[in-house]
Amino acid sequence: MFCLNYKKQKYKYRLNKDLLPEVPVYLSEHGFDYDISKTWSMILCPFHDDKNPSLSINLNLGCFNCFACGAKGGDLIAFHQKFRRLGFIEACKELGAWEKTK
């Protein structure tokens, strides 16, 4: 009997932050109104019932802080995780920043 021994090729995955969307583009795609003329913009917080903008978000980095409910995070991935209720890897995949490497 002839038997071939194939090595299974293992792929590794990694986060590539260069593939993340820009924060203003992300906010526009998800229906948030923001002031593009400022680095920090106030938006309606999606994490609680908000009538007046209470979430401050950095349009360059994506870090955010809500002054009403206390939601906060350090980047766009953290915002997307909380907004969509996802784990880290799932959020990175949805944002298009999870890539396969050999």
Image: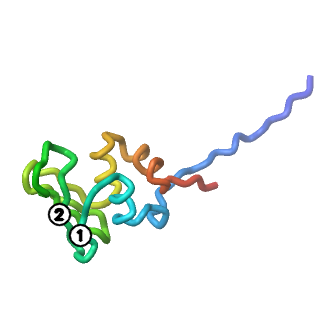
Q: Where is residue 43 in the image (x, y as percent from the top left)?
A: 20, 59
Which image quadrant: the N terminus?
Answer: top right
Q: Nearer the viewer, residue 3 or 97?
A: 97
Drawn side of residue 34 relative to residue 7, left or right: left
Q: Residue 55 bears which disc, if any?
A: none
Q: In this view, does 68 lie to the left or right of 83?
A: left
Where on the picture, by quarter, is residue 54?
A: bottom left
- Residue where numbered disc 1 is placed: 35
The answer to which image quadrant residue 37 occupies is: bottom left
Task: Write the residue at 39% across / 55% down.
Answer: 29
Secondary element type, mark 1: loop
Residue drawn at (32%, 53%), measured in percent from left and top?
A: 31
In front: label 2 or label 1: 1
Tell me if mark 1 has few (under 14), some (14-19) or many (20+) residues whose alpha carbon lies within 10 angstroms of its own. few
Q: Mark 2, residues whose alpha carbon is within 10 Å: few (<14), some, or many (≥20)? A: many
Is residue 78 visible to the viewer in this orientation of the structure? no
Q: Residue furthest right?
A: 1
CA distance separating discs 2 and 1: 8 Å
Q: Which mark is residue 42?
A: 2
Is label 2 in contact with label 1 (beta carbons under 8 Å)?
A: yes
The residue drawn where x is 78% and y is 38% is 6
Identify the image's colour scheme: rainbow, by chain, secondary structure or one colour: rainbow
Task: Please determine whether, in this image, residue 80 is positioned above or below residue 42.
Answer: above
State the count of labels: 2
- Report the front residue among 102 and 70: 70
Q: Which mark sits nearer the N-terminus, 2 or 1?
A: 1
Q: Where residue 5 appears, x then y in whole percent? A: 80, 35
Amino acid carrying label 2: it is Met
Circle 1: residue type: Asp
Q: Nearer the viewer, residue 37 or 48?
A: 37
Q: Which of 73 and 13 is in front in this view?
A: 73
